[in-house]
Image (cartoon, rainbow, N blue to C red):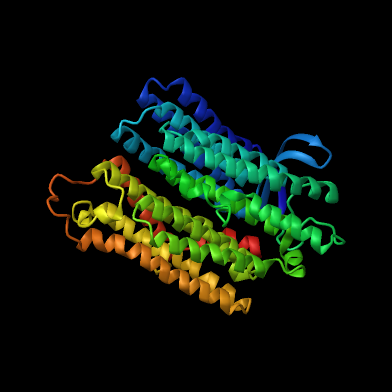
Amino acid sequence: METVVSAKLVYALLAPLAGSILVMLTGKRENVRETMSFLAAVTMFGIVLSITGDVASGKMLRYTLFEILPGLSVTLRADAMSMIFALVASSLWVLAVFYSMGYMRGLEEHAQTRFNACFALALFGAIGTAFSDNLFTMYLFYEIVSICTYPLVAHHQDDEGYEGARKYIVYLTTTAKGLVLPAMIVIYLLTGNLDFATNIHSGILPADAGRLLVTVLYVCCLLGFAKNGVMPVHHWLPGAMVAPTPVSALLHAVAVVKVGVFSTTRVMLYVFGVDVMDKFNLGIPTAYFVSFTIIMASVIALSKDNLKSRLAYSTVSQLSYIILGVALLTPSGVEGGLVHIANHAFSKITLFFCAGAIYVATHKKNISEMSGLGRTMPFTFAAFGIASLSMIGAPPVAGFVTKWYLLLGSMQASQIGILLVLLASTLLNVAYFAPVTFKAFFGKRPEGEAETGIQEAAPAMVVPLCITAVISVIIGIYPDFFMTFVKAVTG
Protein backbone atom coordinates (compact mmCIF):
# COMPACT_ATOMS: atom_id res chain seq x y z
CA MET A 1 0.00 0.00 0.00
CA GLU A 2 1.35 3.39 -1.02
CA THR A 3 1.54 5.96 1.79
CA VAL A 4 0.93 9.57 0.74
CA VAL A 5 1.22 12.74 2.82
CA SER A 6 -2.03 14.63 2.32
CA ALA A 7 -3.42 17.82 3.86
CA LYS A 8 -6.95 16.69 2.91
CA LEU A 9 -7.14 15.04 6.32
CA VAL A 10 -6.58 18.41 7.99
CA TYR A 11 -9.19 20.05 5.78
CA ALA A 12 -11.72 17.39 6.82
CA LEU A 13 -11.08 18.34 10.46
CA LEU A 14 -11.21 22.07 9.81
CA ALA A 15 -14.62 21.98 8.12
CA PRO A 16 -16.69 21.16 11.24
CA LEU A 17 -14.40 23.28 13.43
CA ALA A 18 -14.88 26.30 11.17
CA GLY A 19 -18.58 25.53 10.99
CA SER A 20 -18.84 25.66 14.77
CA ILE A 21 -17.09 29.03 14.93
CA LEU A 22 -19.26 30.49 12.16
CA VAL A 23 -22.41 29.23 13.88
CA MET A 24 -21.43 31.04 17.07
CA LEU A 25 -20.63 34.23 15.16
CA THR A 26 -23.93 34.27 13.27
CA GLY A 27 -26.16 32.80 15.96
CA LYS A 28 -28.58 35.75 16.20
CA ARG A 29 -29.52 35.30 12.54
CA GLU A 30 -30.99 31.82 12.50
CA ASN A 31 -31.16 31.42 8.72
CA VAL A 32 -27.51 32.39 8.36
CA ARG A 33 -26.57 30.19 11.31
CA GLU A 34 -28.20 27.12 9.82
CA THR A 35 -26.72 27.89 6.40
CA MET A 36 -23.28 27.84 8.02
CA SER A 37 -24.04 24.45 9.58
CA PHE A 38 -25.19 23.07 6.25
CA LEU A 39 -22.18 24.42 4.34
CA ALA A 40 -19.78 22.98 6.91
CA ALA A 41 -21.49 19.58 6.66
CA VAL A 42 -21.46 19.56 2.86
CA THR A 43 -17.82 20.69 2.80
CA MET A 44 -16.72 17.93 5.13
CA PHE A 45 -18.66 15.34 3.15
CA GLY A 46 -17.08 16.55 -0.09
CA ILE A 47 -13.59 16.32 1.37
CA VAL A 48 -14.26 12.83 2.72
CA LEU A 49 -15.50 11.77 -0.72
CA SER A 50 -12.26 13.00 -2.29
CA ILE A 51 -10.28 11.01 0.28
CA THR A 52 -12.45 7.98 -0.49
CA GLY A 53 -11.21 7.96 -4.06
CA ASP A 54 -7.59 8.00 -2.92
CA VAL A 55 -8.07 5.15 -0.46
CA ALA A 56 -10.09 3.12 -2.97
CA SER A 57 -7.17 3.38 -5.37
CA GLY A 58 -4.89 1.68 -2.85
CA LYS A 59 -3.34 4.67 -1.10
CA MET A 60 -3.05 5.35 2.63
CA LEU A 61 -3.08 9.06 3.46
CA ARG A 62 -1.16 10.41 6.45
CA TYR A 63 -0.46 13.81 7.92
CA THR A 64 1.45 14.60 11.14
CA LEU A 65 0.20 17.66 12.98
CA PHE A 66 2.90 17.68 15.67
CA GLU A 67 5.15 15.36 17.64
CA ILE A 68 5.13 15.32 21.44
CA LEU A 69 7.75 12.67 22.21
CA PRO A 70 9.66 10.21 20.04
CA GLY A 71 7.02 7.76 18.81
CA LEU A 72 4.20 9.88 20.25
CA SER A 73 2.53 12.30 17.86
CA VAL A 74 -0.82 13.67 16.79
CA THR A 75 -1.04 12.14 13.34
CA LEU A 76 -3.93 11.59 10.97
CA ARG A 77 -4.40 8.63 8.67
CA ALA A 78 -7.00 7.48 6.18
CA ASP A 79 -7.16 3.79 5.37
CA ALA A 80 -9.94 1.36 4.50
CA MET A 81 -11.28 1.09 8.06
CA SER A 82 -11.19 4.87 8.50
CA MET A 83 -13.38 5.36 5.47
CA ILE A 84 -16.21 3.18 6.79
CA PHE A 85 -16.74 5.47 9.76
CA ALA A 86 -15.78 8.74 8.02
CA LEU A 87 -18.28 8.22 5.20
CA VAL A 88 -21.07 7.41 7.64
CA ALA A 89 -20.40 10.38 9.92
CA SER A 90 -19.96 12.95 7.16
CA SER A 91 -22.96 11.90 5.08
CA LEU A 92 -25.36 11.66 7.99
CA TRP A 93 -24.32 15.06 9.33
CA VAL A 94 -25.69 16.65 6.15
CA LEU A 95 -29.10 15.06 6.73
CA ALA A 96 -29.01 15.70 10.48
CA VAL A 97 -28.56 19.44 9.89
CA PHE A 98 -31.80 19.58 7.89
CA TYR A 99 -33.63 17.44 10.41
CA SER A 100 -32.46 19.58 13.31
CA MET A 101 -33.86 22.70 11.64
CA GLY A 102 -37.34 21.20 11.53
CA TYR A 103 -37.15 19.73 15.02
CA MET A 104 -35.66 22.67 16.90
CA ARG A 105 -37.85 25.25 15.18
CA GLY A 106 -40.94 23.06 15.43
CA LEU A 107 -40.62 22.90 19.21
CA GLU A 108 -39.17 26.41 19.48
CA GLU A 109 -36.25 25.04 21.47
CA HIS A 110 -33.97 27.46 23.31
CA ALA A 111 -30.17 27.81 22.87
CA GLN A 112 -30.22 26.73 19.23
CA THR A 113 -26.88 28.44 18.55
CA ARG A 114 -25.14 26.47 21.28
CA PHE A 115 -26.87 23.32 20.04
CA ASN A 116 -25.62 23.75 16.46
CA ALA A 117 -22.11 24.74 17.54
CA CYS A 118 -21.72 21.71 19.81
CA PHE A 119 -23.22 19.48 17.14
CA ALA A 120 -20.47 20.58 14.74
CA LEU A 121 -17.77 20.11 17.39
CA ALA A 122 -19.01 16.58 18.04
CA LEU A 123 -18.51 15.81 14.34
CA PHE A 124 -15.05 17.38 14.58
CA GLY A 125 -14.22 14.82 17.27
CA ALA A 126 -15.84 11.97 15.36
CA ILE A 127 -13.98 12.62 12.11
CA GLY A 128 -10.75 13.05 14.08
CA THR A 129 -11.32 9.64 15.65
CA ALA A 130 -11.96 8.10 12.24
CA PHE A 131 -8.74 9.56 10.83
CA SER A 132 -6.47 8.83 13.82
CA ASP A 133 -3.16 7.17 12.97
CA ASN A 134 -2.33 6.11 16.51
CA LEU A 135 -3.89 5.33 19.86
CA PHE A 136 -2.87 8.67 21.37
CA THR A 137 -4.54 10.72 18.64
CA MET A 138 -7.65 8.59 18.83
CA TYR A 139 -7.80 9.03 22.61
CA LEU A 140 -7.64 12.82 22.26
CA PHE A 141 -10.51 12.97 19.78
CA TYR A 142 -12.49 10.41 21.77
CA GLU A 143 -12.36 12.76 24.76
CA ILE A 144 -13.26 15.76 22.58
CA VAL A 145 -16.46 13.97 21.58
CA SER A 146 -17.32 13.38 25.26
CA ILE A 147 -16.78 17.01 26.23
CA CYS A 148 -18.56 18.54 23.24
CA THR A 149 -21.65 16.36 23.56
CA TYR A 150 -22.14 17.07 27.28
CA PRO A 151 -23.98 20.38 26.60
CA LEU A 152 -26.15 18.55 24.06
CA VAL A 153 -27.27 15.95 26.59
CA ALA A 154 -27.92 18.68 29.17
CA HIS A 155 -29.65 20.87 26.58
CA HIS A 156 -32.99 21.25 28.37
CA GLN A 157 -31.21 22.51 31.50
CA ASP A 158 -33.67 20.89 33.89
CA ASP A 159 -33.06 18.40 36.70
CA GLU A 160 -33.57 15.41 34.41
CA GLY A 161 -31.25 16.86 31.79
CA TYR A 162 -28.46 17.64 34.24
CA GLU A 163 -28.76 14.19 35.85
CA GLY A 164 -28.52 12.44 32.48
CA ALA A 165 -25.61 14.61 31.42
CA ARG A 166 -23.80 14.04 34.73
CA LYS A 167 -24.10 10.28 34.37
CA TYR A 168 -23.01 10.59 30.73
CA ILE A 169 -19.82 12.55 31.38
CA VAL A 170 -18.85 10.65 34.55
CA TYR A 171 -19.14 7.24 32.89
CA LEU A 172 -17.30 8.21 29.72
CA THR A 173 -14.46 10.26 31.18
CA THR A 174 -13.89 7.99 34.19
CA THR A 175 -13.61 4.83 32.11
CA ALA A 176 -11.39 6.49 29.50
CA LYS A 177 -9.03 8.05 32.03
CA GLY A 178 -9.13 5.15 34.48
CA LEU A 179 -8.69 2.30 31.97
CA VAL A 180 -7.64 3.43 28.49
CA LEU A 181 -5.09 6.02 29.58
CA PRO A 182 -3.08 3.65 31.86
CA ALA A 183 -3.23 0.93 29.18
CA MET A 184 -1.99 3.40 26.61
CA ILE A 185 0.97 4.36 28.81
CA VAL A 186 1.94 0.72 29.33
CA ILE A 187 1.69 -0.01 25.60
CA TYR A 188 3.93 2.97 24.86
CA LEU A 189 6.51 1.74 27.39
CA LEU A 190 6.41 -1.73 25.82
CA THR A 191 6.64 -0.65 22.19
CA GLY A 192 8.12 2.85 22.11
CA ASN A 193 5.18 4.12 20.02
CA LEU A 194 1.40 3.98 19.75
CA ASP A 195 1.06 3.82 15.96
CA PHE A 196 -1.59 1.49 14.60
CA ALA A 197 -0.32 -1.49 12.62
CA THR A 198 -0.75 -1.48 8.84
CA ASN A 199 -2.74 -4.74 8.83
CA ILE A 200 -5.05 -6.57 11.19
CA HIS A 201 -2.83 -9.57 11.83
CA SER A 202 0.40 -8.47 13.45
CA GLY A 203 -0.61 -5.84 16.00
CA ILE A 204 2.07 -3.72 17.65
CA LEU A 205 2.79 -5.54 20.92
CA PRO A 206 6.22 -7.21 21.30
CA ALA A 207 6.36 -10.95 20.68
CA ASP A 208 7.54 -11.64 24.23
CA ALA A 209 4.62 -9.86 25.92
CA GLY A 210 3.10 -12.16 28.54
CA ARG A 211 -0.44 -13.50 28.48
CA LEU A 212 -1.50 -11.83 31.73
CA LEU A 213 -0.21 -8.40 30.73
CA VAL A 214 -1.78 -8.56 27.27
CA THR A 215 -5.09 -9.73 28.72
CA VAL A 216 -5.19 -6.91 31.29
CA LEU A 217 -4.39 -4.31 28.61
CA TYR A 218 -7.06 -5.77 26.36
CA VAL A 219 -9.77 -5.72 29.05
CA CYS A 220 -8.86 -2.12 29.92
CA CYS A 221 -9.41 -1.08 26.31
CA LEU A 222 -12.59 -3.12 25.89
CA LEU A 223 -14.27 -1.58 28.95
CA GLY A 224 -12.46 1.77 28.82
CA PHE A 225 -14.04 2.83 25.54
CA ALA A 226 -17.41 2.88 27.30
CA LYS A 227 -19.10 4.63 24.39
CA ASN A 228 -19.32 1.11 22.91
CA GLY A 229 -22.24 0.43 25.26
CA VAL A 230 -21.03 -2.96 26.49
CA MET A 231 -22.58 -4.02 29.79
CA PRO A 232 -21.87 -3.15 32.57
CA VAL A 233 -20.60 0.27 31.33
CA HIS A 234 -23.76 1.03 29.32
CA HIS A 235 -25.85 2.95 31.85
CA TRP A 236 -24.90 6.34 30.44
CA LEU A 237 -26.61 5.55 27.15
CA PRO A 238 -30.27 5.22 28.23
CA GLY A 239 -29.75 8.15 30.60
CA ALA A 240 -28.69 10.36 27.69
CA MET A 241 -32.19 9.99 26.19
CA VAL A 242 -33.25 13.15 28.03
CA ALA A 243 -31.60 15.09 25.21
CA PRO A 244 -33.51 16.41 22.17
CA THR A 245 -34.13 13.76 19.52
CA PRO A 246 -31.54 15.11 17.05
CA VAL A 247 -28.98 14.63 19.83
CA SER A 248 -30.27 11.10 20.45
CA ALA A 249 -29.84 10.42 16.75
CA LEU A 250 -26.31 11.84 16.92
CA LEU A 251 -25.50 9.81 20.04
CA HIS A 252 -26.95 6.50 18.88
CA ALA A 253 -26.18 6.46 15.18
CA VAL A 254 -23.30 8.75 14.28
CA ALA A 255 -20.86 10.38 16.61
CA VAL A 256 -20.82 8.97 20.12
CA VAL A 257 -21.59 5.25 20.04
CA LYS A 258 -19.84 4.79 16.69
CA VAL A 259 -16.76 6.50 18.13
CA GLY A 260 -16.96 3.89 20.90
CA VAL A 261 -17.24 0.78 18.74
CA PHE A 262 -14.86 2.15 16.13
CA SER A 263 -12.21 2.83 18.79
CA THR A 264 -12.76 -0.59 20.36
CA THR A 265 -12.50 -2.52 17.11
CA ARG A 266 -9.63 -0.36 15.87
CA VAL A 267 -7.64 -1.31 18.96
CA MET A 268 -8.66 -4.97 18.72
CA LEU A 269 -7.45 -5.23 15.13
CA TYR A 270 -4.62 -2.71 14.86
CA VAL A 271 -3.06 -2.70 18.36
CA PHE A 272 -3.54 -6.30 19.49
CA GLY A 273 -4.12 -7.90 16.10
CA VAL A 274 -5.90 -11.09 15.10
CA ASP A 275 -2.84 -13.28 15.66
CA VAL A 276 -2.23 -12.13 19.24
CA MET A 277 -5.92 -12.31 20.12
CA ASP A 278 -6.05 -15.84 18.77
CA LYS A 279 -2.79 -16.83 20.49
CA PHE A 280 -4.01 -15.69 23.92
CA ASN A 281 -7.63 -16.80 23.35
CA LEU A 282 -9.07 -13.30 23.69
CA GLY A 283 -11.51 -13.37 20.78
CA ILE A 284 -14.13 -16.04 21.51
CA PRO A 285 -14.46 -15.15 25.22
CA THR A 286 -15.08 -11.54 24.10
CA ALA A 287 -17.75 -12.75 21.69
CA TYR A 288 -19.57 -14.57 24.49
CA PHE A 289 -19.06 -11.66 26.87
CA VAL A 290 -20.79 -9.20 24.52
CA SER A 291 -23.44 -11.82 23.72
CA PHE A 292 -24.78 -11.20 27.22
CA THR A 293 -25.22 -7.52 26.28
CA ILE A 294 -26.96 -8.45 23.01
CA ILE A 295 -29.55 -10.64 24.75
CA MET A 296 -30.09 -8.69 27.98
CA ALA A 297 -30.41 -5.30 26.31
CA SER A 298 -33.01 -6.78 23.96
CA VAL A 299 -34.96 -8.21 26.89
CA ILE A 300 -34.91 -4.82 28.62
CA ALA A 301 -36.02 -3.12 25.38
CA LEU A 302 -39.10 -5.34 25.39
CA SER A 303 -40.17 -3.85 28.72
CA LYS A 304 -39.94 -0.20 27.61
CA ASP A 305 -43.05 1.66 26.52
CA ASN A 306 -41.21 4.92 25.90
CA LEU A 307 -40.11 4.77 22.25
CA LYS A 308 -36.74 6.47 22.73
CA SER A 309 -35.94 4.21 25.69
CA ARG A 310 -36.74 1.14 23.62
CA LEU A 311 -34.49 2.44 20.84
CA ALA A 312 -31.75 3.19 23.37
CA TYR A 313 -31.60 -0.40 24.61
CA SER A 314 -31.80 -1.59 21.02
CA THR A 315 -28.65 0.45 20.40
CA VAL A 316 -26.92 -1.15 23.38
CA SER A 317 -27.69 -4.55 21.88
CA GLN A 318 -26.85 -3.72 18.28
CA LEU A 319 -23.47 -2.16 19.08
CA SER A 320 -22.29 -5.46 20.48
CA TYR A 321 -22.90 -7.11 17.09
CA ILE A 322 -19.96 -5.06 15.84
CA ILE A 323 -17.63 -6.17 18.61
CA LEU A 324 -18.89 -9.76 18.44
CA GLY A 325 -18.14 -10.00 14.72
CA VAL A 326 -14.59 -8.74 15.13
CA ALA A 327 -14.05 -10.96 18.17
CA LEU A 328 -14.85 -14.07 16.12
CA LEU A 329 -11.51 -13.44 14.33
CA THR A 330 -12.79 -15.06 11.13
CA PRO A 331 -12.90 -13.16 7.82
CA SER A 332 -16.70 -13.23 7.57
CA GLY A 333 -17.11 -12.37 11.24
CA VAL A 334 -14.83 -9.34 11.04
CA GLU A 335 -16.52 -8.23 7.82
CA GLY A 336 -19.98 -8.56 9.39
CA GLY A 337 -18.93 -6.57 12.43
CA LEU A 338 -17.31 -3.74 10.48
CA VAL A 339 -20.07 -3.35 7.89
CA HIS A 340 -22.56 -3.03 10.75
CA ILE A 341 -20.92 0.31 11.61
CA ALA A 342 -22.56 1.65 8.44
CA ASN A 343 -25.65 -0.54 8.36
CA HIS A 344 -26.64 0.24 11.93
CA ALA A 345 -25.96 3.97 11.52
CA PHE A 346 -28.33 4.57 8.62
CA SER A 347 -31.08 2.41 10.10
CA LYS A 348 -30.85 3.64 13.68
CA ILE A 349 -30.74 7.31 12.74
CA THR A 350 -33.91 6.67 10.75
CA LEU A 351 -35.60 5.25 13.85
CA PHE A 352 -34.63 8.23 16.00
CA PHE A 353 -35.61 10.67 13.26
CA CYS A 354 -39.01 8.95 13.22
CA ALA A 355 -39.33 9.17 17.01
CA GLY A 356 -38.62 12.90 16.83
CA ALA A 357 -41.08 13.46 13.99
CA ILE A 358 -43.79 11.61 15.94
CA TYR A 359 -43.14 13.75 19.01
CA VAL A 360 -43.17 17.05 17.11
CA ALA A 361 -46.40 16.11 15.28
CA THR A 362 -48.27 14.54 18.20
CA HIS A 363 -46.28 15.18 21.42
CA LYS A 364 -46.51 11.45 22.12
CA LYS A 365 -43.53 9.51 23.49
CA ASN A 366 -45.01 6.14 24.45
CA ILE A 367 -45.63 3.24 22.07
CA SER A 368 -48.98 2.52 23.75
CA GLU A 369 -50.21 5.94 22.57
CA MET A 370 -49.26 5.44 18.91
CA SER A 371 -52.01 3.06 17.75
CA GLY A 372 -53.43 4.24 14.45
CA LEU A 373 -50.89 7.02 13.90
CA GLY A 374 -49.48 5.25 10.84
CA ARG A 375 -52.65 6.09 8.91
CA THR A 376 -52.10 9.82 9.38
CA MET A 377 -48.27 9.74 9.34
CA PRO A 378 -47.65 7.10 6.64
CA PHE A 379 -44.20 8.27 5.53
CA THR A 380 -42.83 8.40 9.06
CA PHE A 381 -44.11 4.99 10.09
CA ALA A 382 -43.21 3.38 6.76
CA ALA A 383 -39.64 4.59 7.27
CA PHE A 384 -39.78 3.28 10.83
CA GLY A 385 -40.92 -0.11 9.55
CA ILE A 386 -38.12 -0.28 6.97
CA ALA A 387 -35.47 0.63 9.54
CA SER A 388 -36.96 -1.91 11.97
CA LEU A 389 -36.54 -4.63 9.35
CA SER A 390 -32.88 -3.67 9.12
CA MET A 391 -32.44 -3.98 12.88
CA ILE A 392 -34.16 -7.35 12.74
CA GLY A 393 -31.90 -8.46 9.89
CA ALA A 394 -34.58 -9.09 7.27
CA PRO A 395 -33.83 -8.83 3.56
CA PRO A 396 -33.53 -6.67 1.54
CA VAL A 397 -32.54 -4.05 4.14
CA ALA A 398 -28.97 -3.35 5.29
CA GLY A 399 -29.12 -5.32 8.53
CA PHE A 400 -29.57 -8.54 6.60
CA VAL A 401 -26.04 -8.17 5.22
CA THR A 402 -24.72 -7.86 8.77
CA LYS A 403 -26.58 -10.91 10.06
CA TRP A 404 -25.53 -12.99 7.03
CA TYR A 405 -21.85 -12.33 7.57
CA LEU A 406 -22.08 -12.78 11.33
CA LEU A 407 -23.80 -16.14 10.90
CA LEU A 408 -21.13 -17.19 8.40
CA GLY A 409 -18.44 -15.99 10.79
CA SER A 410 -19.86 -17.98 13.69
CA MET A 411 -19.87 -21.12 11.55
CA GLN A 412 -16.31 -20.46 10.36
CA ALA A 413 -15.31 -20.21 14.02
CA SER A 414 -17.31 -23.40 14.82
CA GLN A 415 -19.24 -21.49 17.48
CA ILE A 416 -22.75 -22.90 17.57
CA GLY A 417 -23.38 -20.96 20.77
CA ILE A 418 -22.81 -17.64 18.99
CA LEU A 419 -25.04 -18.75 16.14
CA LEU A 420 -27.83 -19.45 18.65
CA VAL A 421 -27.28 -16.04 20.25
CA LEU A 422 -27.70 -14.37 16.86
CA LEU A 423 -30.90 -16.31 16.16
CA ALA A 424 -32.31 -15.59 19.62
CA SER A 425 -31.51 -11.89 19.32
CA THR A 426 -33.25 -11.77 15.95
CA LEU A 427 -36.44 -13.12 17.52
CA LEU A 428 -36.15 -10.54 20.30
CA ASN A 429 -35.67 -7.80 17.69
CA VAL A 430 -38.93 -8.89 16.07
CA ALA A 431 -40.66 -8.90 19.45
CA TYR A 432 -39.82 -5.30 20.32
CA PHE A 433 -39.91 -3.69 16.86
CA ALA A 434 -42.81 -5.34 15.03
CA PRO A 435 -45.56 -4.24 17.48
CA VAL A 436 -44.68 -0.56 16.95
CA THR A 437 -45.34 -0.61 13.21
CA PHE A 438 -48.28 -3.02 13.53
CA LYS A 439 -50.07 -0.83 16.09
CA ALA A 440 -49.39 2.29 14.07
CA PHE A 441 -51.04 0.99 10.91
CA PHE A 442 -53.62 -1.46 12.22
CA GLY A 443 -54.36 -0.34 15.78
CA LYS A 444 -57.32 1.77 16.88
CA ARG A 445 -56.90 5.25 18.26
CA PRO A 446 -57.54 5.51 22.03
CA GLU A 447 -61.13 6.21 23.12
CA GLY A 448 -62.07 9.82 22.70
CA GLU A 449 -59.05 10.68 20.57
CA ALA A 450 -59.75 11.22 16.89
CA GLU A 451 -57.22 10.82 14.11
CA THR A 452 -58.18 14.16 12.59
CA GLY A 453 -55.76 17.01 13.09
CA ILE A 454 -52.69 14.76 13.21
CA GLN A 455 -50.41 14.94 10.19
CA GLU A 456 -46.81 14.43 9.18
CA ALA A 457 -44.15 16.62 10.74
CA ALA A 458 -42.47 19.36 8.70
CA PRO A 459 -40.80 18.31 5.41
CA ALA A 460 -37.42 19.28 6.90
CA MET A 461 -37.87 16.30 9.24
CA VAL A 462 -39.76 13.84 7.03
CA VAL A 463 -37.51 14.12 3.97
CA PRO A 464 -34.25 13.18 5.84
CA LEU A 465 -35.85 10.18 7.52
CA CYS A 466 -37.20 8.96 4.18
CA ILE A 467 -33.76 9.38 2.61
CA THR A 468 -32.00 7.40 5.34
CA ALA A 469 -34.64 4.67 5.10
CA VAL A 470 -34.13 4.43 1.33
CA ILE A 471 -30.34 4.33 1.78
CA SER A 472 -30.79 1.43 4.22
CA VAL A 473 -32.56 -0.49 1.48
CA ILE A 474 -30.02 0.47 -1.18
CA ILE A 475 -27.02 -0.68 0.87
CA GLY A 476 -28.94 -3.84 1.68
CA ILE A 477 -29.47 -4.65 -2.00
CA TYR A 478 -26.12 -3.24 -3.19
CA PRO A 479 -23.72 -3.65 -0.26
CA ASP A 480 -20.58 -3.53 -2.42
CA PHE A 481 -19.72 0.12 -1.71
CA PHE A 482 -19.04 -0.33 2.01
CA MET A 483 -18.00 -3.96 1.57
CA THR A 484 -15.15 -2.80 -0.69
CA PHE A 485 -13.53 -1.08 2.26
CA VAL A 486 -14.50 -3.84 4.71
CA LYS A 487 -12.87 -6.50 2.55
CA ALA A 488 -9.79 -4.30 2.16
CA VAL A 489 -9.43 -4.42 5.96
CA THR A 490 -9.60 -8.21 6.12
CA GLY A 491 -7.67 -8.75 2.89
Q: Position of residue 228 (x, y in %)?
A: 57, 53
Which of the image's four quarters has the C terminus?
A: bottom right
**Residue at the spot 60% in from the left edge and 52% down from the top edge:** 262
Q: Is residue 336 visible?
A: no
Query: Does 80 sit above or below residue 392?
Result: above
Counting labels gives 0
Q: Is residue 468 left or right of residue 134?
A: left
Q: Is residue 85 left or right of residue 307?
A: right
Q: Is residue 247 visible?
A: yes
**Residue at the spot 52% in from the left edge and 76% down from the top edge:** 420
Q: Position of residue 148 (x, y in %)?
A: 54, 34
Closest to the observer, 34 or 285: 285
Q: Position of residue 141 (x, y in %)?
A: 63, 40
Closest to the observer, 460 or 225: 225
Q: Position of residue 44 (x, y in %)?
A: 52, 38
Which of the image's four quarters has the N terminus?
A: bottom right
Q: Is residue 32 left or right of residue 373?
A: right
Q: Is residue 392 left or right of residue 271?
A: left
**Residue at the spot 19% in from the left edge and 52% down from the top edge:** 376
